[in-house]
Amino acid sequence: MALPLVASAWSTPNLWGTPPGFWGPLLSCTGVYVGAPATNPDGTPTAPPCTSLCDLIDTAINIIYFAMTLAIFIIAPVMIVVGAVMIMLAGANPSMLESGKKTLTATVIGLVIVLCAYLIVNTTITVLNISGVGGFGNNSCTTTS
């Protein structure tokens, strides 16, 4: 029965990137002047200077993606485990059982709100054909991401 699972385990779908979620730099540009050096003192490259409103929007989108990544991949799993442990350890304590159920319910509702909010914003921007808004719609901003 497990043979199909073993056969399909050789490749994993790349839905969220590697590693999953957005862990890239939050700032897409820096406030340095245009003639600033291209590298930091330790040799790492600096972010390009901010030159337009598109840079600010791109930074805001990066922060939103990072917050969604934290909510989906870190906070929600921890809260699901907390709720499940509360239910398992409740025993004859009905208040702890109810608290665990409320924790699980709130976590699932929070995940649905996060995912639906992204879906609604993305769909609205795409339908209205708004361009140049971070990773949404037809991106006409010339930013580095």
Image: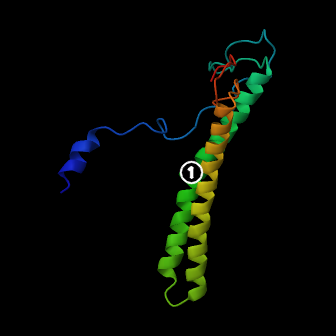
Residue 132 at x, y = what percent?
70, 24
Instruction: Report the residue at 21% width, 44% height from top.
Output: 7
Judged left or right of residue 51, residue 88 is: left
Instruction: Report the residue at 51% width, 66% height from top.
Output: 81
Label 1 crowd bin: few (<14), some (14–19), many (20+), radius 10 Å: some
Residue 122 at x, y = what percent?
64, 37
Residue 112 at x, y = what percent?
59, 55
> Residue flagged by tag 1: what amino acid is it?
Ile
What is the quadrant of residue 139 in the picture?
top right
Q: Name the residue under label 1.
A: 72
Instruction: Report the residue at 62% width, 66% height from top.
Output: 106
Residue pushed farthest bottom? 92
Judged left or right of residue 68, residue 7 is: left
- Of 45 and 92, the residue lying toward us: 92
Q: How many labels does the image show?
A: 1
- Of 42 and 45, the residue lying toward us: 45
Judged left or right of residue 89, residue 126 is: right
- Of 39 and 58, the residue lying toward us: 58
Q: In which quarter of the image is the N terminus?
A: bottom left
What is the quadrant of residue 137 in the picture?
top right
Q: In which quarter of the image is the C terminus?
A: top right
Q: Can residue 30 be seen in this view?
A: no
Residue 96 at x, y = what percent?
58, 82
**Secondary structure beneath disc 1?**
helix
